[in-house]
Amino acid sequence: RLWRGRKGVKRQIITDDIGYLLSVVIHKANLHDTKIGYWAAGLATFAYPTLEKICADGGYRGTFVYEAYKYFGLRVEISKKLKPHGWQVLPKRWIVERTFSWLNHSRRLSKDYELTIASAETLIKISHIHTLLNRLWTLILRNVLAVIYTERGDRTRIISARRADRDEEAAYFGQFKQ
């Protein structure tokens, strides 16, 4: 557990516009974002060479902007803080925050259980793959249900397919109640 450092661990991720994970870097928390952020940028540009621009928050201004352009040819757009009129969502930052919240659904990622950086990064990738497969599965199921009900010619049941299934189950199990 020596890799964690005295102040804990930080996770640096780069996502696309939808929030899908492009790269992940885990490091000690006592290292600043501007010095470590270009590792994640390097991994992302190596995996996706057509990447042209990165949006980042104010913690990445300075040397990160310079090094990302110098070494990888990436333009970095820093999201500015809005005028303090209460709480507001920063532009583009919510995408990364949403991805972090998707990752927090995994129990194994709630605490730092891992002994190595490689296993921690791998578990983040596995958790994200699990999220993507669940979304793909629900999309496939919705399309299959739509096709089944469309082939019957019963278009009104497409909208209420799940509700109808629940009603049928309730009627079936209701007959056993005394």
Image (cartoon, rainbow, N blue to C red):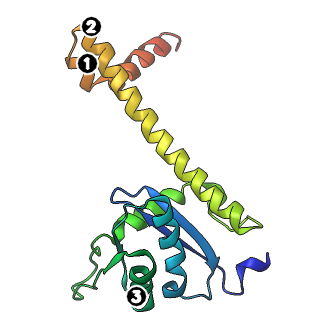
The foreground one among 109 and 31 is 31
Decide: is 134 above or below 84: above
Q: Is residue 101 visible?
A: no
Q: Amino acid at mark 2?
A: Arg
Q: Position of residue 137 (x, y in %)?
A: 46, 33
The foreground one among 104 and 140 is 140
Q: Which disc, if any, is residue 152?
A: 2
Tell me what residue is drawn at x 48 percent, y 10 percent.
175
Q: Position of residue 139 (x, y in %)?
A: 38, 34
Q: Are marks 2 and 1 in contact (CB under 8 Å)?
A: yes
Figure quadrant of residue 98: bottom left
Which is closer to the viewer, label 2 or label 1? 2
Name the residue tied to disc 3: 66
Tell me what residue is drawn at x 37 percent, y 80 percent.
57
Q: Residues within 10 Å of mark 1 (few under 14, many from 20)?
A: some
Q: Secondary structure at mark 1?
A: helix
